[in-house]
Image (cartoon, rainbow, N blue to C red):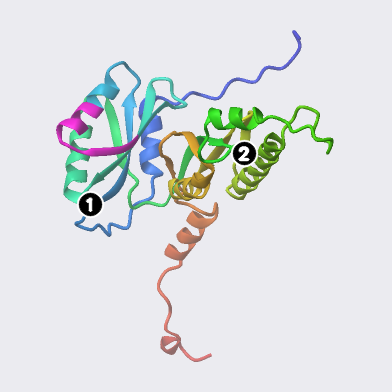
């Protein structure tokens, strides 16, 4: 409408402002490192241009670092991309990898989330069998091809008891998979005659536990997105800074014994 009031769109932050906001709001780690090899999580903020991924992975491969997961995605700033890299290394190797990544021209910053309080998520898509762990189409065909006896006991409709039992078992498997998936706050997103696909978004350790529990059903396919992390907020209360300022400006305590009587 021509008289409709239009509000201006919020200002878009620049790449430098977005990187500074992420680095400043990242909580500091405890610094309690160990000398043995462990898992490290790095967030690499890079320029959104062709060839950056090859340069980053090329440095990691040339130094022999074992990359567990690598997730690359765009950010709210069109010219900025975010890489989340999980590597297995010792503290010395991790420090060297961080310095070498920071030396690259398209890299704005490298943030280490290994010792920080973070929110970690990973997505899983898994296709499970509902006909048993053997999952062979020949087994179903042989069950449905069992000849009917037709002895007048009600089984003369062309469906063998073996196929009926198979149908009931498949529905029992669907019910069990759905209940187990709901316990992990997941969903069943597709159902077919022989398989179901479940969707789960959780921490990596929780996804590992879920895969172990559904292993007996028969896993046909499994795809994991990789780890995505974000630092928790450093300031938990909007009154935190105000309280700290009041404590600082209160001044030294007065010794009552030095005051005059009365």
Left or right: 243, with 95 as reference point: right
Q: Is residue 194 above or below residue 96?
A: above
Outermost residue on the front side: it is 151
Q: Name the residue under label 2.
A: 187
Residue 3, percent from left and from top = 76, 11
* Depth order, front residue of 131/142: 142
Closer to the chain start, of discs 2 and 1, is 1
- Name the residue at 41% across, 39% down: 227
Query: Callout 2: few (<14), some (14-19), or many (20+) C-alpha neighbours within 10 Å?
Result: some
Which residue is at 46% across, 58% downward?
245
Q: Where is residue 128 in the image (x, y as percent from the top left)?
A: 54, 36
Q: Mark 1 points at which residue?
A: 37
Disc 2 secondary structure class: strand
In the picture shown, does residue 208 fall above or below 67? Answer: below
Residue 219 picture location, percent across and down: 49, 38
Q: Nearer the viewer, residue 213 or 133?
A: 133
Residue in view at x 52 percent, y 31 percent: 136
Q: Residue 212 carries which label?
A: none
Q: Is residue 103 visible?
A: no
Foreground residue among 197 and 156: 156
Q: Report if residue 102 lies within the magenta region.
A: no
Which residue reaches farthest bottom? 261
Q: Crowding at label 1, few (<14), some or many (≥20) Cα neighbours within 10 Å?
A: some
Query: What's drawn in magenta, residue-wise?
Result: 57-69
The residue depicted at 38 percent of the width and 24 percent of the height is: 80
In the rendered image, is residue 15 in sight? yes
Q: 214 or 100, which lies in front?
A: 214
């Amino acid at each position: 409408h021509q008289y409709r009031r239009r509000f201006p769109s919020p200002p878009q932050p620049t790449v430098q402002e977005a990187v500074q906001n992420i680095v400043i709001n990242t909580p500091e780690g405890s610094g309690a490192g160990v000398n043995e090899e462990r898992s490290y999580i790095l967030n690499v903020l890079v320029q959104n241009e062709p060839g950056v991924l090859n340069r980053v992975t090329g440095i990691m491969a040339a130094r022999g670092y074992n990359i567990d997961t690598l997730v690359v995605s765009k950010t709210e700033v069109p010219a900025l991309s975010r890489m989340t890299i999980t590597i297995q290394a010792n503290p010395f190797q991790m420090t060297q990898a961080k310095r070498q990544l920071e030396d690259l021209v398209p890299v704005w910053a490298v943030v280490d989330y290994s010792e920080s309080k973070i929110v970690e998520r990973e997505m899983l898509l898994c296709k499970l069998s509902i006909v048993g762990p053997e999952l062979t189409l020949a087994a179903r065909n042989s069950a449905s091809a069992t000849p009917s006896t037709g002895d007048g006991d009600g089984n003369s409709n062309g469906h063998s008891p073996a196929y009926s039992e198979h149908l009931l078992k498949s529905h029992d498997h669907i019910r069990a998979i759905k209940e187990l998936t709901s316990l992990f706050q997941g969903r069943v997103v597709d159902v077919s005659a022989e398989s179901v696909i479940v969707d789960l978004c959780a921490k990596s350790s929780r996804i590992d536990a879920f895969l172990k529990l559904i292993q007996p059903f028969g896993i046909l396919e499994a795809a994991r997105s990789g780890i995505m992390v974000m630092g928790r907020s450093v300031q938990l209360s909007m009154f935190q800074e105000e309280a700290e300022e009041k404590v600082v400006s209160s001044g030294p305590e007065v010794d009552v014994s030095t005051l005059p009587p009365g």
